[in-house]
């Protein structure tokens, strides 16, 4: 099963890109000009998003520096232990919906610890969480902010629930693919 997943993960992105190019050619869409027009629009959007991104970065920094992250990790630890989530991975599961860069820094730090390399249970679980969860609060800040949506309560709830489901699904996936590490 693992070899099928490795082969699929190697070929899925090139096949999607090739499919887009073939679909564009069949429909006679000027692909290069369309790409350049999209890039021009993306630059303007990036400039409009800068205040929202800066506000989010400040909020993440305050959250981590205030000790709130450590406090929440201590509260969540008994539940995480019941799900066999190592305590080193819990901060990443909590930070991932907030910040991609912060969770990636935690993942890199986990890989560099002597007992938790990339091939350990904690390393595989953290990697799977990094890939399967999303930066829900960042997405709501940037995308909803760029189009002026102010009512995002239900989107936030669904996004955070999907992140929770992804964390549980990550544990199950790593357990199924690497039962000897569990």
Image (cartoon, rainbow, N blue to C red):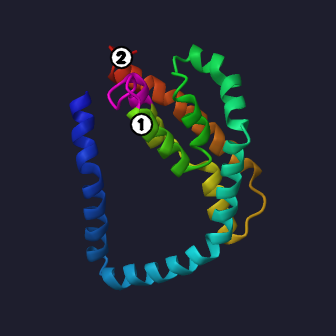
In what element is the residue under mark 2? loop
**Quadrant of the rendering where the N terminus is positioned:** top left
Residue at 71% x, 53% y: name it.
59
Residue at 23% x, 49% y: name it.
11
Q: Which residues are magenta?
A: 113-125
Residue 134 percent across, percent down from the top left:
54, 46
Drawn side of residue 7 relative to residue 64, left or right: left
Picture layout, residue 17 above or below residue 104: below
Cβ atoms under marks 1 and 2 closer than 8 Å: no
Picture layout, residue 127 above or below residue 26: above
Task: Estimate how packed mark 2 is, as few (under 14), some (14 to 19) or many (20 or more) residues with alpha carbons within 10 Å.
Answer: few
The disc placed on residue 127 is 1
* Magenta span contains residue 20: no
Q: CA distance from mark 1 to mark 2?
A: 15 Å
Q: Name the residue tied to disc 2.
A: 181
Residue 181 percent across, percent down from the top left:
36, 16
Q: Is residue 146 visible?
A: yes
In what element is the residue under mark 1? helix
Task: Estimate how packed mark 1 is, as few (under 14), some (14 to 19) or many (20 or more) residues with alpha carbons within 10 Å.
Answer: many
Residue at 53% x, 27% y: name it.
168
Q: Main secondary structure of the magenta part?
A: loop
Residue 7 percent across, percent down from the top left:
21, 40
Res 25 quadrant in image: bottom left
User: Looking at this view, is 73 or 169 the one in front?
Assistant: 73
Drawn side of residue 121 relative to residue 8, left or right: right
Drawn side of residue 117 relative to residue 42, left or right: left
Res 24 quadrant in image: bottom left
Picture layout, residue 100 above or below residue 6: below
* Magenta span contains residue 120: yes
Residue 22 percent across, percent down from the top left:
25, 69
**Quadrant of the rendering where the C terminus is positioned:** top left
């Amino acid at each position: 099963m693992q070899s099928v997943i490795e082969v699929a993960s190697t070929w899925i992105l090139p096949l999607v890109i090739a499919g887009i190019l073939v679909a564009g050619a069949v429909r006679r869409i000027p692909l290069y000009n369309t790409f350049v027009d999209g890039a021009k629009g993306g630059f303007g959007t990036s400039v409009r998003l800068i205040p929202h991104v800066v506000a989010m970065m400040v909020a993440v920094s305050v959250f981590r520096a205030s000790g709130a992250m450590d406090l929440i990790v201590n509260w969540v630890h008994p539940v995480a232990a019941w799900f066999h989530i190592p305590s080193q991975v819990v901060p990443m599961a909590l930070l991932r919906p907030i910040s991609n860069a912060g969770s990636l820094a935690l993942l890199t730090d986990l890989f560099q610890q002597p007992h938790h390399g990339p091939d350990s249970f904690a390393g595989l679980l953290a990697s799977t969480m990094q890939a399967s969860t999303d930066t829900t609060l960042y997405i709501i800040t940037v995308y909803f902010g760029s189009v002026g949506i102010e009512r995002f309560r239900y989107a936030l709830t669904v996004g955070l629930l999907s992140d929770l489901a992804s964390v549980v699904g990550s544990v199950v996936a790593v357990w199924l693919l690497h039962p000897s590490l569990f």
